[in-house]
Amino acid sequence: MTAAMVLDVGLALLVVAVAVWIVAAGSAFAAVVGFVSFGLLLALAWARLAAVDVALTEAAIGSGVTGALLMTAASRLRPTESRSAGERPGAFLHVVAAVLAVLVSAGLAALVLIPASPAPSLAPAAAVHLPELDVLNPVTAVLMAYRAVDTLLEKIVLLLALIGVWSLAPDRFWGGAPGLWPRSRPDGELTLLARLLPPIGIVVGIYILWVGAIAPGGAFQGGAILAAMWLLIMIAGLRPVPEIHRQWLRLVLVVGPAVFLTVGFAGFFLPNGFLSYPAQFTKPLIIVIEVVLTLSIAAILGLLVAGPPERERQR
């Protein structure tokens, strides 16, 4: 057995062990910490499978942003956790859930270990036309061409999710700012980190966006990094959470999907259909869409973590 195989087997066993620990965790906070660790391990697993784009997305979204959301939810629900302890499901429901989990795991294992021969794939047919897009990263090319409608809908769903979070606010807080963030001492470690890390993180986020045309990266990964830097600044208290009625903020939120839709509808008049790119402008249009989507994704993810408005609008 080679060293690489030992690493892969150990990583797989560790992923399963952390998943079991999350389910068996006694508190919501412990489960969230396990979930973040689980996401990072999955990112390593995807990297071992040479799916670097998926690994970046898993680390940034699955573990980072989602972990922050769950951490916030766990902290807010902590006062009610002891009262709900007696309402936990009984042994029968635990057994049923375990059986279903085993069946699903066995089915997925069968799909991987006993694949169809030959395995059905559209990859060769897709690869034939990818050079026409002049985008060397096949993942970005597929997401912005063959799956452009899915990519557009994903961004619209993110925006709708943010509107749903905002709708949880009482009427008197509508248009105000999300809840107060914990403030650190001016000479504290968090403040120091919030002053040193964002310049580096912003450069990395822009690089991840730009390199997405030729290598693993793109709007989602870059936007998640920028959102993390923005959140760090707000948590440290260096900048306040903006009020949601701000026109500039709403413009940043919608500019990505709006430009994407505009390019999509322009396809009816220029090439021959929705989200069809003119041959001579394919790469520039994809880059423009990715840039504005990065801004919108960063703003949406940051405000999703910030939560609904909890402070009245300043008059």
Image (spheres, rainbow, N blue to C red):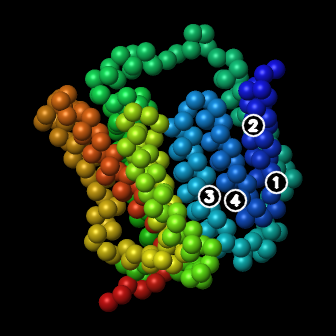
Task: Name the residue type under label 2.
Answer: Leu
Choose between 61 and 5: the one closer to the eye: 5
CA gap, disc 4 to disc 2? 20 Å
Closer to us: mark 4 or mark 1? 4
CA gap, disc 2 to disc 3? 21 Å
**Element marked by disc 1:** helix
Determine which quarter of the picture holds residue 142.
Answer: top left
Please tell me how crowded label 4 is: few (under 14), some (14-19), or many (20+) other residues with Cα within 10 Å. many
Please tell me how crowded label 1 is: few (under 14), some (14-19), or many (20+) other residues with Cα within 10 Å. few
Q: Mark 1 points at which residue?
A: 24
CA gap, disc 4 to disc 1? 12 Å
Task: Name the residue type under label 4.
Answer: Val
Give the side of residue 190 with respect to residue 149, left or right. right
Residue 294: give x, y in percent of width and height. 38, 52
Asked whether the residues under the numbered discs 2 and 1 touch, taking CB atoms below 8 Å apart as contact, a structural biologist would say: no
Choose between 37 and 146: the one closer to the eye: 37
Determine which quarter of the picture holds residue 69.
Answer: bottom right
Q: Mark 4 points at which residue?
A: 32
Closer to us: mark 4 or mark 2? 2
